[in-house]
Image: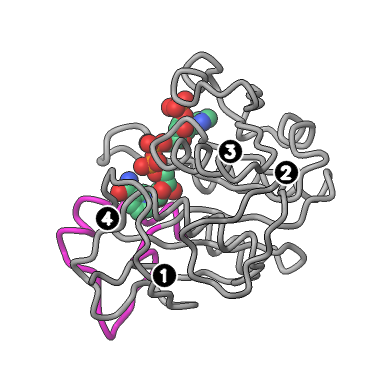
Amino acid sequence: MPVPVSGHLYPDVHNFTMRLAILGASGRNGTELTKQAMEQCHDVTALVRSEEKMREKVPDERLKVEIVNVTSVESLTRHFKGKDAVVSALGHVGELKDTVAIFSESIKAIVPAMRNAGVCRLLTLSAWYTFDDPKEPAPPIVLQLLGNVLKDLAHMESYLMAECGDLEWTSARFPSLTAGPATELPFAENADAVQVYGSQRCRVARGDVARFVLATLSSGKYKGKAVAVATLQN
Ligand SMILES: NC(=O)c1ccc[n+]([C@@H]2O[C@H](COP(=O)([O-])OP(=O)(O)OC[C@H]3O[C@@H](n4cnc5c(N)ncnc54)[C@H](OP(=O)(O)O)[C@@H]3O)[C@@H](O)[C@H]2O)c1
């Protein structure tokens, strides 16, 4: 039985069970998202490269865990069949100075696999400042530290914008994250923007990342869009 979606602040969230495939479910955001999705009684399949690591992070017997190759269309197609939505919580696991390709390489397999499997809803986690904003440019330190990650996230988003008009994709852009649980703070959301103006020092709790993802999937908001997100502090 679906339980009420708690903590969201959308009047139009529909309360139904979704069959979710979560890529990167063993990561920090992915774990939080998997836990919240299970709490809300969604039908969750964690698509990961280590079942042992996933089971350690979320020891819930109801969770389906499947091993997948995130750059193989054939592998992803098999695991996407029968799902309502795919979430990519994949992240770069190496050094920040390394070349980053996980986002651009995975999206080019995820999208054709979704088409093959007949799944059209996709939500990808992204970050503020994937593109230049002349009005409020990224702080130099952000570009210095995260330049390689942002560049590859921008490749992923460009591909979604240019070549995925047939899919209901959303790229949710977040600022720095903290390890905190979900709050009940309202979200500030800026569609088609690379940041939320006036919130530059904002840090979002990973629990709120998961809360935003589930509320957005349930409400059907931001299809075919990137959206910058912050939480409004009291
Ligand atoms: N971290 C932040 O402060 C921050 C801020 C804004 C936005 N975001 C966005 O949030 C997303 C995830 O961040 P995170 O902090 O949760 O990352 P994370 O903890 O480093 O998790 C990364 C996930 O990606 C998986 N992964 C990486 N390469 C893979 C590969 N080749 N094959 C299969 N799985 C692979 C990892 O699997 P393993 O567990 O097997 O390694 C892990 O599940 C990113 O898109 C990032 O842009 C993060």
Q: What amino acid does circle 4 point to?
A: Ser
Report, in whole angstroms, how far the alpha carbon at label 3 lies from the one at label 4: 25 Å
Report crowding for label 3: few under 14, some 14 to 19, many 20 or more residues within 10 A (C-alpha): some
Q: Is tag 1's residue or tag 4's residue first in the polypeptide sequence?
A: 4
Q: Are marks 1 and 4 in contact (CB under 8 Å)?
A: no
Answer yes or no: disc 1 within 8 Å of ligand 1.
no
Q: Is tag 2's residue or tag 3's residue first in the polypeptide sequence?
A: 2
Q: Which residue is mark 1?
A: 228
Answer yes or no: disc 4 within 8 Å of ligand 1.
yes
Q: Quadrant of the N terminus?
A: top right
**Which residue occupies the foreground of this view, 29 or 136?**
29
Q: Mark 1 against mark 3, which lies toward the viewer?
A: 3
What percent of the width, then of the height, locates residue 68?
64, 26
**Residue 82 drawn above or below residue 55:** below
Q: Is tag 1's residue or tag 3's residue first in the polypeptide sequence?
A: 3
What percent of the width, then of the height, locates residue 141?
15, 59
Q: Which residue is mark 2?
A: 1
Q: What amino acid does circle 1 point to?
A: Ala
Q: Is residue 11 left or right of residue 98?
A: right
Report, in whole angstroms, how far the alpha carbon at label 2 lies from the one at label 1: 32 Å
Q: What amino acid does circle 3 point to?
A: Met
User: Which residue is at 37% across, 62% downward?
Assistant: 184
Q: Mark 2 against mark 1, which lies toward the viewer?
A: 2
